[in-house]
């Protein structure tokens, strides 16, 4: 085995992968990378149609239908001023070359800390590096609600075992 094979990525080393199963839009699930400091990074799950189908992404827009996630201004140690979001709140709209549109929800009740502005310039990063540079947003659940929000997400094992169970039972 090559020495480089045993090194973990930053995401693998410092974040726990949890999954939000989108019940409104089947298969459009999210991966939530959870850090020990309770900050979460919202990404597309490996099974999301954009990633799975390697769709050609034209644009990622954080300003749509009277929603503007770019107006988010967070300041200070307590992260004051961020937009409060529900699990169903939309973070962005993704347009693909084939004409398909995807509205990406937040996945948990939290405060928006940052959007990934680099996706506006390089939208293909969303599929090329969906669990790192292609993240959608950085959020933080309220400390009092953190445990409950994490219980509402699936572990990586449960998500993929559930996925296998669902595909086996549908045959």
Image (spheres, rainbow, N blue to C red):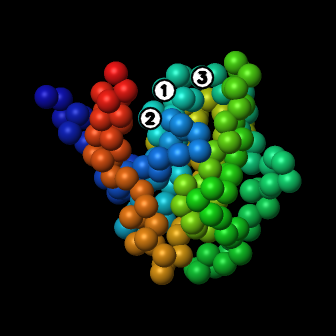
Q: Are marks 2 and 1 in contact (CB under 8 Å)?
A: yes
SS at circle 1: helix
Give the label on residue 55, or none: 3
Instruction: Compute the Cα span from label 2 to label 1.
Output: 6 Å
In three-dimensional space, the C-alpha distance between marks 1 and 3, rounded to whole angstroms, equals 8 Å
| Circle 1 crowding by C-alpha within 10 Å: few under 14, some 14–19, many from 20 | few
Looking at the image, the residue that sits furthest to the top is: 98
| Residue at image mark 1 | 52
Q: Is residue 61 above or below residue 17?
A: above
The one of 7 and 97 positioned closer to us in this rendering? 97
Callout 3 secondary element: loop
N-terminal label among 3 and 2: 2
The answer to which of 20 and 59 lies nearer the viewer is 20
Residue at the image point whose x is 42% and y is 49% from the top = 19
- Name which of mark 2 and mark 1 comes first in the sequence: 2
Where, quadrant-wise, is the C terminus in this rendering? top left
Vertical arrangement, residue 165 with respect to residue 114, above or below: above
Which residue is denoted by mark 2 in the rendering?
Answer: 46
Labels 1 & 3 near each other (Cβ < 8 A): no
Q: Quadrant of residue 109?
A: bottom right
Under circle 2, the secondary element is loop
Residue 102 in the image: state x and y as whole percent.
67, 36
Which x, y percent locates residue 104? 63, 45
Please rate how many residues cluster around mark 2, counting C-alpha atoms within 10 Å: few if below 14, some from 14 to 19, many from 20: some
On residue 133, the disc is none
Q: Is residue 11 left or right of residue 124?
A: left
Residue at 48%, 76% (x, y): give it. 145
């Amino acid at each position: 085995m090559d020495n480089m094979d045993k090194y973990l990525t930053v995401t693998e080393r410092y974040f726990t992968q949890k999954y939000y199963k989108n019940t409104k839009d089947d298969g459009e699930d999210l991966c939530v990378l959870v850090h020990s400091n309770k900050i979460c990074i919202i990404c597309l799950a490996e099974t999301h149609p954009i990633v799975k189908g390697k769709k050609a992404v034209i644009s990622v827009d954080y300003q749509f239908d009277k929603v503007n996630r770019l107006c988010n201004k967070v300041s200070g140690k307590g992260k004051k001023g961020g937009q409060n979001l529900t699990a169903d709140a939309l973070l962005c709209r993704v347009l693909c070359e084939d004409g398909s549109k995807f509205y990406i929800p937040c996945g948990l009740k939290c405060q928006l800390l940052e959007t990934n502005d680099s996706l506006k310039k390089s939208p293909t990063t969303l599929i090329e590096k969906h669990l790192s540079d292609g993240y959608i947003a950085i959020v933080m659940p309220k400390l009092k609600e953190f445990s409950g929000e994490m219980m509402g997400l699936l572990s990586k094992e449960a998500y993929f075992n559930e996925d296998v169970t669902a595909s086996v039972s549908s045959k």
